[in-house]
Amino acid sequence: MTIRQLLLKFLYPVFRGVQRLFKRNIKIFSSTENARRSFYDLKYPVNHGDDVSFEDFRNKKILLVNTASDCGFTSQYESLEKLYEQHKDQLIILAFPANDFKGQEKKDDQAIAEFCKSNYHVQFPVMKKSKVIKHSSQNEVYKWLTDKDRNGWNDQAPTWNFCKYLVDEQGNLTHFFEAAIEPLGPEMQSAIGLAPVTSPGL
C-alpha cells in the first residue's frame, strides 16, 4: 500500500462515522419488483479476461460492488472478504473496479488484481475495469442495475465508490446501498438474510 492508502485505512472508522453523522452516502433503496430482462442473460469478464456467465450464479444471492483502490471506502474490501468467507456457499460477491470518481482506481487490471490480493486477500471475483456510472460506455451489467426497464424498478446509479446492489436467488434486484453502508453492518445482514457464521462453541 502507498502511504496515502495506509492513512486512509487507519482513518476509515473516523471517515465512516463522519459520513453517518452528516447522513452522507447512507441511502438504501429496496423493492420486490421482478426483473423485466433476465439477469442471467448477462456475462462479464474477470480481470484476467475470461467471461463469466451470470447463469452460473443462479440460486445464489449476488452482491455487486463498484470498487476503487485509492478511496476512503477501500477498507471495505476487508469486510467484503469476511462476508464472502462466511456465506460463499450461498452468496457471491462481484467487484467492479471503476475510475469514475476522482481517478481513484489503478490504471490496469493486473495492478488492481495484485492490490486486492496482496492487501486484502480477496478471493471473490474481481471483474475487468469498466465504467459504472450512466454513460455511453457504461458496462452492460451496470446498465441492467441502473435501468428500471431492465431490472424492474431501479434507476439509481452509483453515487460513489463502494455502492452495492443485491440480487436475489431468482435474479431479481432487491436492494441498492450507498457507499457508507458497511458490508458486515446490520442493514446488509438483514437484507441478505443469512445468519453470520460462528465457530463451534461460540
Image (tube, rainbow, N blue to C red):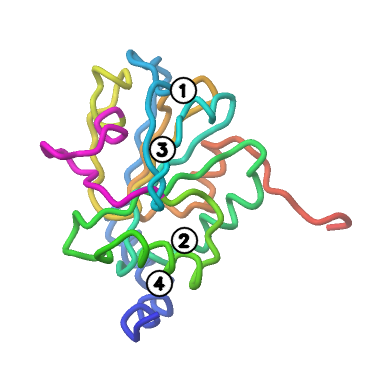
Left/right of residue 3 with respect to residue 91 in the rendered view? left
- To which residue does mark 3 refer? 51
Q: Earlier in the sequence, mark 4 or mark 3?
A: 4
- To which residue does mark 2 refer? 77
Callout 3, which amino acid? Asp
Left/right of residue 15 with respect to residue 160 in the rendered view? right
Quadrant where the C terminus sits is: bottom right
For the residues bearing labels 3 and 2, Cβ distance under 8 angstroms: no
Left/right of residue 23 with respect to residue 65 in the rendered view? left
Helix, strand or loop for disc 1:
loop
Above or below, 65 against 103 in this view is: above
Q: Quadrant of residue 158?
A: top left
Residue at 38% of width from left, 66% of height from top? Answer: 17
- Which circle, 4 or 3, is nearer the viewer? 3
The picture places residue 149, in percent across and down from the top left corner, at: 24, 17
- Which circle, 3 or 2, is nearer the viewer? 3
- To which residue does mark 1 refer? 171
- Which circle, 2 or 4, is nearer the viewer? 2
Q: Nearer the viewer, residue 159 or 59?
A: 59
Q: Earlier in the sequence, mark 1 or mark 4?
A: 4
Helix, strand or loop for disc 4:
helix
